[in-house]
């Protein structure tokens, strides 16, 4: 309860000057009370903020327990990208991620058959837990990039809701499928080689394929991590930007190219081992993330004015 007391203490600070001592004004939302904030899952609170806070861009906490101050918006359409599923309002991120996505999209546009990127979910305007999907994506440092080559950058809002990406796997992710191309490899290799990138998550068959086809520098393979799903898109995770001292990096991947680990994932898909606890499988839902599960700065991020 120490944390909860700290939460209330910060709120009291935030409330200084308010007429009532238990009502908090939210800049673009109805007022909420301290008890409402303490009893409401954080995804309900962050999921309804439609605008970013002011201030300096800062990621607070860890990828699956954190928030984003002063998020930036990826323009819905650029010369080499379109943001997809605009109704979700998840085309927000730390400015370093916005730069990264734009850079990667310019690279994509140099590849045959690609005019740029279709960009899937990044973060909410203030980061934090989401109403639906994604355990991570809370810091503005995660982005999902569609496997579907962007060939038309004039899609309407409605088309960006209805168009689907393509699956690039077969055999449950043990192998790449017919839709997988050398351009997917080039794109993921380029992303994984960027010093801003901490990890890329993609289905195991894609990593094994890259392990088998790479004849040059293999160092980028370390950043590519096999994971469940991730065949309609791949997921890019950046390291904490310089100066974001309250952003918590994930432990670096083990040294080496990680190819044997990927082959073990592949074998487990093809010949599933007898059921036993799998340390890699996401833990079952352990209840809702509440405000006092997040860094204390996230209260100000939640309540701050634009
Ligand atoms: Zn993702």
Image (spheres, rainbow, N blue to C red):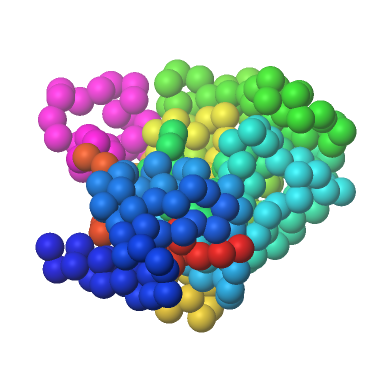
Instruction: Classify residue 90 by image quadrant.
Output: top right
Given residues 23 and 60, the one toward you in this image is 23
Compared with 43, 275 (above or below) is: above
- Residue at 25%, 47% (x, y): give it: 39
Instruction: Classify residue 158 by image quadrant.
Output: top right
Residue 168 seen in this snapshot = yes
| Residue 256 rendering spot, x and y as whole percentages | 40, 60
Q: Magenta span: helix, strand or loop, mainly?
A: loop
| Residue 282 rendering spot, x and y as whole percentages | 28, 39
Q: Is residue 287 left or right of residue 122?
A: left
Q: Is residue 53 left or right of residue 19?
A: right
Compared with 31, 17 (above or below) is: below
- Residue at 49%, 57% (x, y): give it: 26
Given residues 161 and 142, the one toward you in this image is 161
- Residue at 27%, 66% (x, y): give it: 7
Instruction: Classify residue 101 by image quadrant.
Output: bottom right
Q: Which quadrant is the N terminus positioned in?
A: bottom left
Residue 297 seen in this snapshot = no
Compared with 207, 222 (above or below) is: below
Q: Which quadrant is the C terminus positioned in?
A: bottom right
Q: How many marks?
A: 0
Q: What stretch of residues is rendered in magenta?
A: 263-286
Q: Is 114 inside the magenta-drawn segment? A: no
- Residue at 59%, 58% (x, y): give it: 52
Q: Is residue 30 left or right of residue 214?
A: left
Q: Is residue 113 left or right of residue 167?
A: right
């Amino acid at each position: 309860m120490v944390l909860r007391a700290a939460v209330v203490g910060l709120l009291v600070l935030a409330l200084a000057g308010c007429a009532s001592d238990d009502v908090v004004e939210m800049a673009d939302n109805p007022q909420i009370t301290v008890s409402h904030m303490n009893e409401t899952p954080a995804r309900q609170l962050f999921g309804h903020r439609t605008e970013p806070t002011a201030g300096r861009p800062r990621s607070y906490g860890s990828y699956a327990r954190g928030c984003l101050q002063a998020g930036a918006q990826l323009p819905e359409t650029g010369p080499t990208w379109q943001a997809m599923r605009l109704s979700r309002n998840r085309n927000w991120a730390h400015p370093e991620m916005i730069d990264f996505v734009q850079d990667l999209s310019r690279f994509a546009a140099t590849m045959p058959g690609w005019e740029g990127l279709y960009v899937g979910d990044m973060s909410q305007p203030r980061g934090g837990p989401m109403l639906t999907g994604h355990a991570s994506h809370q810091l503005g440092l995660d982005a999902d990039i569609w496997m579907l080559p962007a060939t038309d950058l004039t899609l309407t809002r409605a088309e960006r809701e209805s168009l689907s990406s393509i699956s690039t796997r077969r055999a449950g992710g043990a192998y790449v499928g017919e839709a997988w191309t050398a351009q997917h490899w080039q794109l993921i290799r380029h992303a994984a080689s960027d010093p801003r990138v901490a990890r890329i998550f993609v289905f195991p068959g894609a990593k094994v394929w890259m392990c088998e086809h790479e004849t040059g520098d293999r160092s980028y393979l370390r950043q590519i991590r096999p994971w469940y799903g991730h065949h309609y898109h791949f997921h890019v995770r950046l390291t904490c930007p310089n100066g974001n001292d309250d952003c918590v990096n994930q432990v670096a991947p083990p040294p080496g190219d990680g190819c044997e680990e990927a082959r073990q994932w592949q074998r487990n898909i093809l010949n599933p081992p007898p059921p036993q606890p799998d340390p890699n499988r996401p833990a079952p839902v352990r209840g809702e993330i509440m405000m006092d599960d997040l860094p204390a700065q996230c209260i100000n991020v939640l309540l701050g004015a634009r």
